[in-house]
Amino acid sequence: MTTAIYLEMGQWRMYWSFRVWRGKGSASPSQLACILLAQVPVALSRGRTVIVLADSEFGLVDFLAAVRKRSWRAVVGMRCNRKLADGCNLKQLYRNGKRGQQVYLEGISYPRTGSWFWLKRAEGKRELRFVVSIHSYSGVDLVRLGRRRWSIEGFFKTIKHRFGQSTKLGVYRWPIFASIAYLLAHWIDQWSLPPVLDWKAASDLALKSLFPSIVWF
């Protein structure tokens, strides 16, 4: 399992770095993420608004404190059963609250802004997802950022499972090689007819279309 950091700085969107989680007894994914945040050069973020997008695994006190310490903005996915300070949970917020309202999570003293949205999944199904931020975004902006995180998540899942590696060296090579494979498969998919984006079919077609030419040359 890898812990990766994706940063948004104004018009910049960048995949920063990653660490390999070595299992029970080693540094947790959240602790690894805090190390990655500490290694972002000050010069890179100076004068820019930095937004850190993360999934529910990083909705912990230490990670949020590390982001807040740098005056950055964290937008983090949350499980629907995440407890609030008043004993309720986020799912009850969906039923009785409104998007963009302030919430107090259990164990965190400062307020956060919460919202939710419906995420489209395979076969036309939808899932209710919750997102919170330590910055006072409007409900509309928070939903937009929450959806953006899921598009990034989809990208990483695709290149991990379709174009991934299982060795340590492979993990280091993975961001470059997987991104190249991803772009080639997407290009082949756009070239083929009909352009229905099926990543397995696109990667198979890219292999059949490009590999013979590489061997020939």
Image (tube, rainbow, N blue to C red):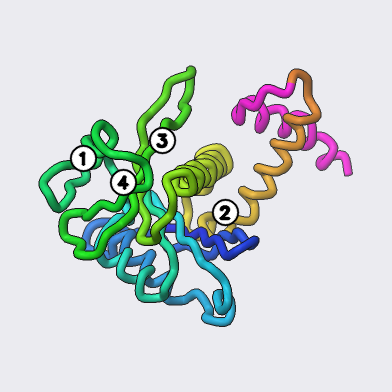
- Between 37 and 9, the one nearer to me in the picture: 9
Provide the secondary structure element on which disc 2 rests: helix
Residue 137 covered by magenta stretch: no
Mark 3 vs mark 2: in front: 3
Residue 82 as seen in the image, left or right of residue 100: left
What secondary structure prevails in the magenta region? helix
Choose the circle earlier in sequence order: 3 or 2: 3
The amino acid marked with disc number 1 is Asn
Which residue is under mark 2?
A: 174
- Which image quarter is the C terminus in? top right
Instruction: Tell me the distance, in whole angstroms, between the alpha carbons under discs 1 and 3.
Output: 15 Å
Label 1 or label 2, whichever lies nearer to me, is 1
How many residues crowd mark 4 within 10 Å: few (<14), some (14–19), many (20+)? many
Label 1, label 2: how far apart the Cα atoms are = 34 Å
Left or right: 117 in relation to 13: left
Label 4 sits on residue: 78
Is 216 within the magenta?
yes
- The amino acid pointed to by label 3 is Phe
Q: Are marks 3 and 2 in contact (CB under 8 Å)?
A: no
The residue to which callout 3 is attached is: 117
Task: Give the camera-side residue of 82 and 202.
Answer: 82
Mark number, residue 103: none
